[in-house]
């Protein structure tokens, strides 16, 4: 784990709120000069703390009205079989998150699609074509209450 001080924490907080902040704007919020802020951001990037910068898209405004959490149980749990599943699931554009979980199921995927018809097509023609699927359980999201980035408490 990488050690952070309060300034590193604040940099991450501000960049999670607005990744388009310039070094000058970030320095102004931190009451520092731009050079040390630039160096800190570069260090956080080089150490892999900041993995990438993205634009968060409102899924409903781009026609993706339906979000489904789908539990997946594999038939076979051998390492090679699990690896093949992972290689294939990450290729499916409808899958926006994939988590390896414990409990009754092996994976939880978050699927975002236009409507029920598109989800049915996804299940029948894409997910069902993966060779190691034992069973699935779909949970339809009725409303999104909170969708945030990682919470970074100050030490």
Image: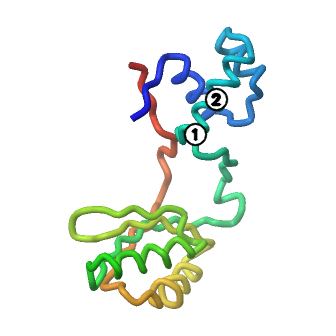
The residue at 35%/63% (across/down) is: 100
Which part of the image, by quadrant, shows the C terminus?
A: top left
Q: Where does label 2 land, which residue?
A: 41
Q: Earlier in the sequence, mark 2 or mark 1?
A: 2
Question: In the rendered view, does 89 fall on the left or right side of 72?
Answer: right
Answer with the quarter of the image where residue 82 lies.
bottom left
In the figure, 45 relative to 12: above or below?
below
Q: Where does label 1 land, which residue?
A: 50
Answer with the quarter of the image where residue 7 lies.
top right
State the image coordinates of residue 57 (x, y, percent, origin top left): 68, 53
| Residues at circles 2 and 1 in contact by the CB criterion of under 8 Å | yes
Q: Residues within 10 Å of mark 2 (few under 14, many from 20)?
A: many
State the image coordinates of residue 95 (x, y, percent, origin top left): 53, 69
The residue at 43%/26% (across/down) is: 3
State the image coordinates of residue 43 (x, y, percent, origin top left): 60, 31
Label 2, label 1: how far apart the Cα atoms are? 8 Å
The residue at 35%/71% (across/down) is: 71
The residue at 51%/24% (across/down) is: 9
């Amino acid at each position: 784990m990488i050690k952070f001080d309060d300034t590193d924490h604040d940099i991450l907080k501000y960049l999670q709120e607005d990744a388009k902040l310039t070094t000058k704007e970030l320095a102004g919020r931190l009451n520092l000069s731009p050079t040390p802020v630039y160096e800190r951001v570069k260090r956080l990037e080089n150490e892999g703390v900041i993995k990438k910068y993205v634009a968060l898209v409102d899924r409903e405004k781009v026609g993706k009205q339906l979000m489904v959490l789908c539990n997946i149980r594999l038939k076979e749990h051998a390492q090679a079989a699990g690896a093949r599943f992972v290689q294939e699931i990450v290729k499916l554009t409808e899958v926006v998150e994939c988590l390896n979980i414990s409990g009754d199921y092996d994976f939880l995927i978050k699927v975002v699609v236009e409507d029920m018809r598109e989800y049915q097509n996804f299940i029948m023609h894409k997910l069902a074509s993966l060779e190691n699927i034992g069973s699935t359980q779909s949970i339809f999201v009725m409303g999104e209450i909170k969708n945030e980035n990682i919470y970074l408490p100050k030490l």
